[in-house]
Amino acid sequence: MKITKRLSSHISKTPHGLALLASRSRDDVNWQFPPAEFTLGDVPDQESVLSTRGVLYTYSIVHVDRERGPYALAMVDFEPDVRVFGPMIYEPGKEPPLGATMEVTAYALKDGSEDYAFRQSTGSAA
């Protein structure tokens, strides 16, 4: 059986800002994020660019130690029925309420590679 490795990023730049990509196999009705890294067979997975904005489902603020300070991890719901987990950027004491509109924003990992994070949206929906 043929195995194909996905080479493109799970982040897409759109005219409205950063968006995330979800995928599903031809036999599945559910979308997944991040997209599958490998596909089996000759038919590639179907991909969908999610909106640049989603709805905050839940989050947790993690306190590791005094030197690094707290950080937040969030779960954000996007259409079509995809829940995405990732870092949340917030101002301490001004955490967004559950149900808030969140936007995908660029986030640099410690190694300098580009990834995504969520922050509360201040603009109109895309």
Image (tube, grey):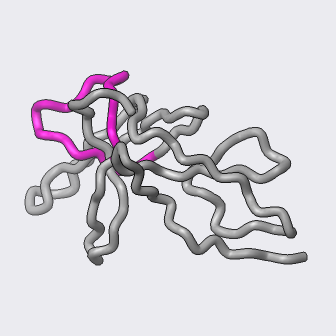
Q: Quadrant of the C terminus?
A: top left
Look at 9% across and 62% down and name the residue there.
Answer: 67
Count of marks placed on residues: 0
Percent across and percent down for residue 112 are: 27, 75
From the image, give the main secondary structure of the stretch colored magenta.
loop
Q: Determine if the magenta segment contains residue 100.
A: yes
Look at 37% across and 48% down and name the residue there.
Answer: 15
Q: Is residue 73 visible?
A: no
Residue in the foreground of this view, choosing between 27 and 110: 27
Look at 37% across and 22% down and name the residue there.
Answer: 99
| Residue at the extreme right of the image, as rendered | 1
Magenta residues, start to end: 85-104
Q: Which picture quadrant has residue 98?
A: top left
Q: Is residue 20 above or below residue 82?
A: below
Look at 26% across and 41% down and name the residue there.
Answer: 119
In the image, taking residue 60 as reference, residue 21 lies left or right, namely right
In the image, taking residue 38 as reference, residue 9 lies left or right, namely left
Q: Is residue 35 visible?
A: yes
Percent across and percent down for residue 32 are: 63, 48
